Amino acid sequence: MTNIDPSAKIGNNVSMDDSVVIQNGVHIGNDCVFGKRVVIEKKTVIGNGVTMGDGCVIEKQVNVGNDCVLGTKVVIEKQTIIGNGVTMGDNIVIEKNVTILDNSTISSDIVIEAGNTFPEE
């Protein structure tokens, strides 16, 4: 069952499975697609044209840029910034306070440790 907090702002042409949870203060752009069992926590901003596979968890105060593709079972911990045009594989954990630069590609089955920038500068 979909659970969308009434304070969430959701753009146009957003498609989501019926098992999505969107908490308070979330902003979602236009033209997004969310798979099954996606959870988006408080005060997170999702840009336009973002696709999330099944089982993604986006913790509070995360900013996901435009035109990103997240595979299945991607966990993004709090206060992380994902740039525009980022592509992620499956089974990824991005720990808190990470910055992912624009147009990065992250392969499957990886953990990016807290406080880092990817790719490293």
Image: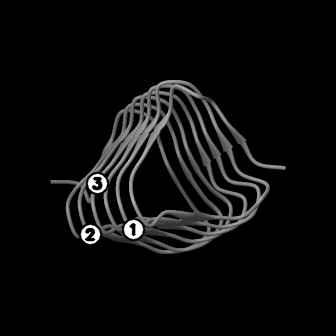
Q: Amino acid at mark 2?
A: Gly
- The x, y position of residue 52, in whole percent, is 55, 65
CB contact under 8 Å: marks 3 and 2: yes
- Cα distance, mark 3 to mark 2? 7 Å
Dot 3 corresponds to which residue?
A: 65
Which class describes the residues within 10 Å of circle 3: few (<14), some (14-19), or many (20+)?
A: many
- The x, y position of residue 120, in whole percent, is 23, 54
Left or right of 26? Residue 63 is: left
- Cα distance, mark 1 to mark 3? 13 Å
Label 1 element class: loop
Which class describes the residues within 10 Å of circle 2: few (<14), some (14-19), or many (20+)?
A: some
Left or right of 85? Residue 35 is: right
Looking at marks 3 and 2 on the same chain, the residue that comes earlier in the sequence is marked by: 3
* 79 vs 39: above or below: above
Q: Amino acid at mark 3?
A: Gly
Label 3 element class: loop
Dot 2 corresponds to which residue?
A: 85
Q: Nearer the viewer, residue 54 or 49?
A: 49
Label 2 element class: loop
Dot 1 corresponds to which residue?
A: 31
Q: Residue furthest right?
A: 1
Q: Nearer the viewer, residue 101 or 32?
A: 32
Q: Amino acid at mark 1?
A: Asp
The quarter in which the C terminus is drawn is: bottom left
Which class describes the residues within 10 Å of circle 1: few (<14), some (14-19), or many (20+)?
A: some
Q: Which marked residue is nearer to the observer: mark 1 or mark 3? A: 1
Looking at marks 2 and 1 on the same chain, the residue that comes earlier in the sequence is marked by: 1
Q: Residue at x 32, y 53 (%)?
A: 47
* 98 vs 50: above or below: above
